[in-house]
Every structure is written in structure tokens, then in C-alpha cells.
Image (tube, rainbow, N blue to C red):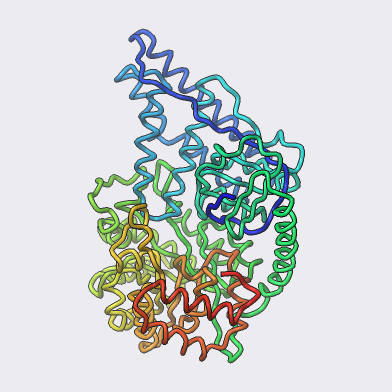
């Protein structure tokens, strides 16, 4: 039995299929001066061939709004990016490296840059780059790229990783599940598996080494378990689990259409975290009442120019119109420091998580900031749009950002462009200083949204992507729960709603505690919404409040976690936490 990261729920039992994705090896070697042009031509042909292959695969996807289509479009954009192509050509010409070595060197530098990105979702985009690199190297070596489309029978794929091109070709009827060495819950492989309702376990580290031609494979996407060549007893056990999972899913589906109201009448608004407009429909089907976090960074990345105000307006408007009355919370640009765009010249920083990023970057690059604000304001005329500033650390910084909003409003008025004059403006509370002065900040804005990913990181002084300290990342830490309650109380005393949009909001294990702490809205991955709704509807809010208050007396996250699990098993015996 192997354990990895449960990336997509469900149980599958079937024949194993090993998908080979080994990178061609490159060794340091140079070419004579007269051969440099040949190497450049060979590299450009490999890039062009890769581009043709991806376009052909994308052309077979009928729904241009689908996740695979969008991912493949991102890959095509990467193939146009000067960071990848021009730097490789430069290395060939200047250092006379052979094309494969020059490309490998450029690819390695770019991957290290992505690895340093703090935001997990954006960091995972480094996998896109790695997959593009694999395809180019295969084409440079003159080898074909093995196609998932050739699979003709139901199988469970075992691979080091799956590229979006792989997943785009998978037919639901022929692939039962994935098991991969690498990946996380936010990798494209995991996202695609969830969108197709295919069980998946990622981050198994050695499943390809252990595979050994296994005839049969079990994948349990809920527990993160993979069994190669299982015993008959294991097959019987997981067959029963598979049946039980199917029953649970049928039961959960009905909750998507119901309001998230506790037994004693406390209503929680459940919203979706999205990145692309195309995610709106899935969010609505999952029961989202709006968007609590609309990330806008990808409008700025993987392109040579900045997005225009009109392009941004049309994108935000599209989402606003899909949700009609439900709120659509647009987070202003969270770029800079550890997140970059090729068209923005930013110096590297020693400590990017605490450097020139988010609203700090926007206040320095005021015209970029104001252009986005105008686009959001214009979209507010077409739906219930809200605007939210990330990484606010104090009242002075907030007032500076609000002053830019006023300038943008004045400009639109002069242009006679319609917008909602009362469009709500809020902040993400994700820095301890903001949490501690929540009462002061609440007087200046219309809503709070707690960004737990950064709040926990900064409050506990741990680097989430540092494997040596990541175990200290504890949402139930005795410092985090009182901090959350303080933010909620600060917001409510000023009469504004308090939302949570970090990963903690979408984990069913924390729903009962967050209900008890008084949150008004939870924003999460769309797939989590039905289960969170069920927990809310089976809870009594005043009992949850009393229980959450009792947790604050305990000294460690481990103690709190044990007490919470016992409570959840008592209240929700049908759920697994």
C-alpha cells in the first residue's frame, strides 16, 4: 500500500497502465561556430513542432471554455514567451551550446524561479513549463510523444506526471483513475481529475518505480491510497468502499441546491474561488451563491503586453453577468516580488513574501493599478461586483489604495462611463498587523475576507513551501483561532460582513469551527461546496459557537485537532475527516 495526496475523490479498481514520461538526458556539449545556426534552426523546429502538436490536440476539444482548452492555450503562450525561446537561442549563439543543453539550462533557471513563488496555485504553473520542456526535448531528440489517446480499454494510469495535453485526450470511459509521483491538490492533473470526476492520488513519489508491470491497481482518492497488485481481500474491501462512495455522492448532490442554513437559522453564504471566467458554470452547478475570490493575476502573465482596461472590463463583466445577483469579488492584482509577469520589470528580492507585492506593488505602479480599478468599476454596472485589496497591513496603506479608487471614479465620471457608485470595497486580512487592528480597518471598508494561507504563514513565521518547516503550518494553532475571532468581531462591531477565502474555508473539517467563530461567508473550491453545505445544515450554530470558544483554551494544535475530530465523529458520523 502506498500513500500520497488525495487529489480527486472516489475509488477505482482496474488494470494498470504505465505512461512513460522520462525526460531525454542532456550532457554539456558545444558545437563549432559554423554549426551554431544549425543548432538554432533545430531548436526552432522543435518549438514549432511542439506548437503544432498542442494546437492539434487543442483543436480536438470542442468546448473552448473547458479547463483543458485553457491549459493548452497557456502552453501555447509559454511557447511564444521570450524567456523560454529567446534565452535559449541566446545561449546557443553566445556559448555555442548544443540546443538540448542550452534549453535545459534555461528551463532549469525558469523552474527555479517558479519554485520560489509563494502562492501554491501559481507555483504549480511551473509544472506547465516542465511539461512544455518535456515535449520540446522529445521533439529535439526526434522521438514521438506517447499519446494517451491510444488507450482503448479502461485502465488506471500510473505516471510520473500527466501533462494537460495528456489529460485533454483522456476519455472518461477509458481512464478510471490517475496515480502519479508528483503533484498537489492544485496541480493541473488534480484539477482535471476533479473536473472529470476521476479518482486521483498524486505526490506518491515512487509509484512509477514500484509499478513493476502491475496487472491490477486500486486508487482510493479519498484516503490517498494506491495498492499495486492487491490481494483478493483488498479488492473486496475497496469494492465495498466504491459502492459506499457512490451512495454518498448521490446524497451530496441534493445539497448543492439547498441554502447553507444551520438548524437554528444561522445562514452562511458559500462562494467559489475562481481564476477563469469559464469556472463560473461549474461553480453555479456546485451551489455557489457568488464568487468570494476572483484571482486576476493570470490576465497579466504569459503574455508580452499588459492587458488593456477594455480586456479586463470584458473579462470581469462576463463573470458578473453569469452570477447576476450573487457577489463577484475581484481581488486586485496580487503581483510582484514572488509573482511576476514578463512585461513588468521587477528586481529579485531576498524575501519576496514580505517584499514589493500585491497592493504595495500596485501603489508603486499606480497607472497599472488604476487601469484595473477602472475596469472593475465598469464591470460593477453589470452585476453585483465587489473589489478587494490583498495584503493590506495598515490604515495608511488602505487609505492610499482607496484614494486611487476615488481617482478612478472621477476619471470615469469625466468620461461619462457608468459604474456602481456604491460598489463595495473590502480587504483581505492576511497580515497579523491587519488582524490586530481589524476594528480600525473595518471603519474604512465594506467587508473583510480572511486569507488564511498567508495569515497562518505570517502569524507562525513559517515558509509554507519550505519542506523543513511546512509541518508547522497548522490552521488549528492556538494563535490562529483567536486571531480569526478577533477579525470577525472587529468586522461585526463596525457592521460589515466577514468572509474567509483561504484553503481553510473549503476543508469540511473546519466548517463547524468557522460556523462557531461567526464567519458570514466561506469561499472555496467549487467541489467542496455541497459537503460544506451539508455540515452547515446539520449543525446548530449556537452549539458550534460554544464549542469553538472552548477550543481556545487548549495549548496545541494537536490537542485541538483531537477534540475537534471527536466532536465531528459524534455529530457527523456519515462523514470522514
Quarter of the rendering containing residue 471: bottom left
In this rendering, is residue 74 above or below 437? above
Could you tell me which residue is drawn at 51 percent across and 91 percent down?
Answer: 542
- Look at the image and tell me in which quarter the C terminus lies: bottom right
Q: Nearer the viewer, residue 4 or 34?
A: 4
Q: Is residue 187 left or right of residue 248?
A: left
Vertical arrangement, residue 122 with respect to residue 35, above or below: below
The picture places residue 89, in percent across and down from the top left corner, at 38, 24
Residue 483: image quadrant is bottom left
Say whether residue 312 is visible. yes
Residue at image position (63%, 80%) is 259
Figure label count: 0
Q: Residue at x 57, y 42 (%)?
A: 164
Residue 1: x %, y % from top left: 59, 50
Q: Residue at x 52, y 55 (%)?
A: 185
Q: In the rendered view, does 166 fall on the left or right side of 43?
A: right
In the displayed structure, does residue 501 sit left or right of residue 480?
right
Q: Which of the 4 image quarters holds residue 243?
A: bottom right
207 shown above or below 431: above
Task: Classify 121 as above or below 478.
Answer: above
Residue 73's x, y, as percent? Answer: 55, 42
Q: Residue 118 in the image: x percent, y percent? A: 36, 54
Viewer can see residue 418: no
Amino acid at each position: 500500500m502506498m500513500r500520497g495526496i488525495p487529489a480527486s475523490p472516489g475509488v477505482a479498481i482496474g488494470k494498470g497502465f504505465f505512461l512513460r514520461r522520462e525526460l531525454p538526458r542532456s550532457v554539456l556539449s558545444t558545437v563549432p561556430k559554423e554549426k551554431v545556426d544549425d543548432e538554432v534552426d533545430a531548436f526552432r523546429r522543435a518549438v514549432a513542432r511542439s506548437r503544432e502538436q498542442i494546437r492539434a490536440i487543442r483543436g480536438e476539444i470542442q468546448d473552448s471554455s473547458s479547463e483543458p482548452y485553457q491549459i493548452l492555450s497557456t502552453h501555447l503562450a509559454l511557447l511564444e514567451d521570450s524567456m523560454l525561446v529567446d534565452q535559449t537561442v541566446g545561449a546557443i549563439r553566445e556559448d555555442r551550446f548544443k540546443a538540448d543543453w542550452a534549453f535545459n539550462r534555461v528551463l532549469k533557471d525558469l523552474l527555479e524561479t517558479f519554485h520560489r513563488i509563494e502562492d501554491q496555485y501559481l507555483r504549480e504553473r511551473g509544472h506547465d513549463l516542465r511539461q512544455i520542456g518535456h515535449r520540446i526535448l522529445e521533439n529535439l531528440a526526434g522521438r514521438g510523444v506517447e499519446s494517451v489517446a491510444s488507450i482503448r480499454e479502461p485502465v488506471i494510469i500510473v505516471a510520473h506526471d500527466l501533462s494537460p495535453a495528456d489529460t485533454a485526450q483522456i476519455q472518461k470511459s477509458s481512464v478510471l483513475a490517475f496515480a502519479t509521483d508528483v503533484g498537489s491538490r492544485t496541480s493541473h492533473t488534480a484539477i482535471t481529475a476533479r473536473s472529470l470526476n476521476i479518482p486521483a492520488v498524486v505526490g506518491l513519489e515512487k509509484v512509477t518505480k514500484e509499478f513493476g508491470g502491475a496487472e491490477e491497481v486500486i486508487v482510493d482518492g479519498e484516503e490517498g491510497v494506491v495498492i499495486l497488485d492487491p490481494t483478493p481481500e483488498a479488492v473486496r474491501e475497496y469494492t465495498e468502499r466504491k459502492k459506499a462512495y457512490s451512495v454518498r455522492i448521490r446524497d451530496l448532490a441534493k445539497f448543492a441546491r439547498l441554502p447553507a442554513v444551520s438548524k437554528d437559522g444561522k445562514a452562511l453564504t458559500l462562494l467559489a474561488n475562481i481564476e477563469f471566467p469559464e469556472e463560473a458554470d461549474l461553480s453555479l452547478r456546485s451551489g455557489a451563491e457568488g464568487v468570494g475570490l476572483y484571482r486576476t493575476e493570470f490576465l497579466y502573465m504569459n503574455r508580452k503586453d499588459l492587458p488593456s482596461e477594455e480586456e479586463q472590463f470584458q473579462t470581469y463583466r462576463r463573470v458578473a453577468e453569469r452570477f447576476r445577483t450573487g457577489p463577484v469579488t475581484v481581488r486586485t492584482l496580487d503581483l510582484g516580488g514572488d509573482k511576476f509577469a514578463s512585461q513588468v520589470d521587477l528586481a529579485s528580492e531576498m524575501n519576496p513574501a514580505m517584499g514589493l507585492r500585491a497592493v504595495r506593488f500596485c501603489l508603486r505602479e499606480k497607472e497599472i493599478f488604476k487601469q484595473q480599478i477602472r475596469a472593475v468599476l465598469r464591470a460593477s454596472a453589470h452585476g453585483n461586483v465587489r473589489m478587494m485589496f490583498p495584503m493590506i497591513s495598515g490604515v495608511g496603506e488602505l487609505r492610499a489604495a482607496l484614494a486611487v479608487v476615488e481617482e478612478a471614479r472621477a476619471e470615469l465620471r469625466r468620461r461619462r462611463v457608468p459604474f456602481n457608485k456604491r460598489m463595495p470595497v473590502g480587504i483581505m486580512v492576511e497580515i497579523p498587523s491587519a488582524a490586530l487592528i481589524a476594528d480600525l480597518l473595518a471603519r474604512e471598508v465594506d467587508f473583510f475576507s480572511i486569507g488564511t494561507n498567508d495569515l497562518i504563514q505570517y502569524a507562525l513565521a513559517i515558509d509554507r513551501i519550505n519542506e523543513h518547516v511546512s509541518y508547522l503550518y497548522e490552521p488549528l494553532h492556538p494563535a490562529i483561532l483567536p486571531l480569526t475571532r478577533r477579525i470577525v468581531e472587529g468586522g461585526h462591531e463596525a457592521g460589515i460582513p466577514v468572509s474567509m477565502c483561504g484553503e481553510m474555508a473549503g476543508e469540511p473539517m473546519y466548517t463547524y469551527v468557522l460556523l462557531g467563530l461567526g464567519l458570514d461567508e466561506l469561499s472555496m473550491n467549487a467541489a467542496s461546496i455541497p459537503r460544506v453545505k451539508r455540515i452547515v445544515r446539520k449543525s446548530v450554530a449556537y452549539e458550534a459557537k460554544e464549542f469553538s470558544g472552548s477550543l481556545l483554551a487548549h495549548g496545541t494544535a494537536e490537542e485541538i485537532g483531537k477534540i475537534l475530530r471527536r466532536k465531528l465523529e459524534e455529530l457527523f458520523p456519515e462523514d470522514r475527516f
